[in-house]
């Protein structure tokens, strides 16, 4: 191992140790769902837009921590913003801002008919979702949409730029007359439909 590489590795280790030590003093202000990637991106950029660094980490719930000096301001920002944009945040005890409900946009329709609608064209985020590899494999097996429910999300993709994302629930089956359960899945769609997060499902893929 060269001296330069050894030095770089040592500096990286020191930085991680210093960062870990700093984070021990940071203050938890709230939590979001561990599978809510859109909120994770948004909250990080919302706080950065006000000059506040944050760490979002955890498992089932992701805790949001900030330097103690910024805790009160960050907490108030989140309370106001979550109510305005309708995303879920837990502030401890019984204080919860609940996410707005998804709206049913498609019911009882062949996938082929849905894809012909302009709002699900190949250049749209939801169109990219329906044409994605994962969903295309499902709709080949289950080509009939029982329900498509969508919650549109405005989120800060950067500290200065808003984008639109979606929480999506899709239920599929083989045919209109099919009685057997097919597939139901939950997803997040963001980055103009280029990013897809799988949140869970019922039924066989």
Image (cartoon, helix red, strand yellow):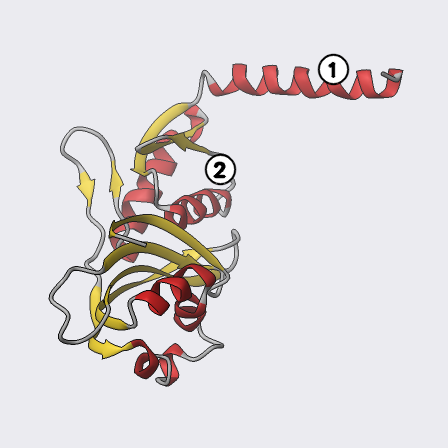
Q: Which residue is mark 1?
A: 10
Looking at this view, is 199 or 153 the one in front? 199
Residue 65 is drawn in which quadrant?
top left
Residue 62 tag number: none
Q: From the viewer's perspective, tell me whether residue 14 is left or right of residue 120.
A: right
Q: Position of residue 165 (x, y in %)?
A: 39, 61
Tell how many labels: 2
Residue 103 is drawn in which quadrant?
bottom left
> Which quadrant is the C terminus positioned in?
bottom left
Q: From the viewer's perspective, tell me whether residue 48 is left or right of residue 16.
A: left
Q: Position of residue 82 (x, y in %)?
A: 29, 49
Q: State whether residue 32 is above or below residue 16.
A: below
Secondary structure beneath label 2:
loop
Q: State whether residue 100 is above or below residue 8.
A: below
Instruction: Count residues near mark 1 (Cα–Cα under 10 Å), then give few for <14, some for 14-19, many for 20+.
Output: few
Looking at this view, is 185 or 158 the one in front? 185
Q: From the viewer's perspective, tell me whether residue 14 is left or right of residue 174.
A: right
Q: Which residue is mark 2?
A: 52
Q: Position of residue 51 (x, y in %)?
A: 52, 41
Q: Residue at x 57, y 21 (%)?
A: 19
Secondary structure beneath label 1:
helix
């Amino acid at each position: 191992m060269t001296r330069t590489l050894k030095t770089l590795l040592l500096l990286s280790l020191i930085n991680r140790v210093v960062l870990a030590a700093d984070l021990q003093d940071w203050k938890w202000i709230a939590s979001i769902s561990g599978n809510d990637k859109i909120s994770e991106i948004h909250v990080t950029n919302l706080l950065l837009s006000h000059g506040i660094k944050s760490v979002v980490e955890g498992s089932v719930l992701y805790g949001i921590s900030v330097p103690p000096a910024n805790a009160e301001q960050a907490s108030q920002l989140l309370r106001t913003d979550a109510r305005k944009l309708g995303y879920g945040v837990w502030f401890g005890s019984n204080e919860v801002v609940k996410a707005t409900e998804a709206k049913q946009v498609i019911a009882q329709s062949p996938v082929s008919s849905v894809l012909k609608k302009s709002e699900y064209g190949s250049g749209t985020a939801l169109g990219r979702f329906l044409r994605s590899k994962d969903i295309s494999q499902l709709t080949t097996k289950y080509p009939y949409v029982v329900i498509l429910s969508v919650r549109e999300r405005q989120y800060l993709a950067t500290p200065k730029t808003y984008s639109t994302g979606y929480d999506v629930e899709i239920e599929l089956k083989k045919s209109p007359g099919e009685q057997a359960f097919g597939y139901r899945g939950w997803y997040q769609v963001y980055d103009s439909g280029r990013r897809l997060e799988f949140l869970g499902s019922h039924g066989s893929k």
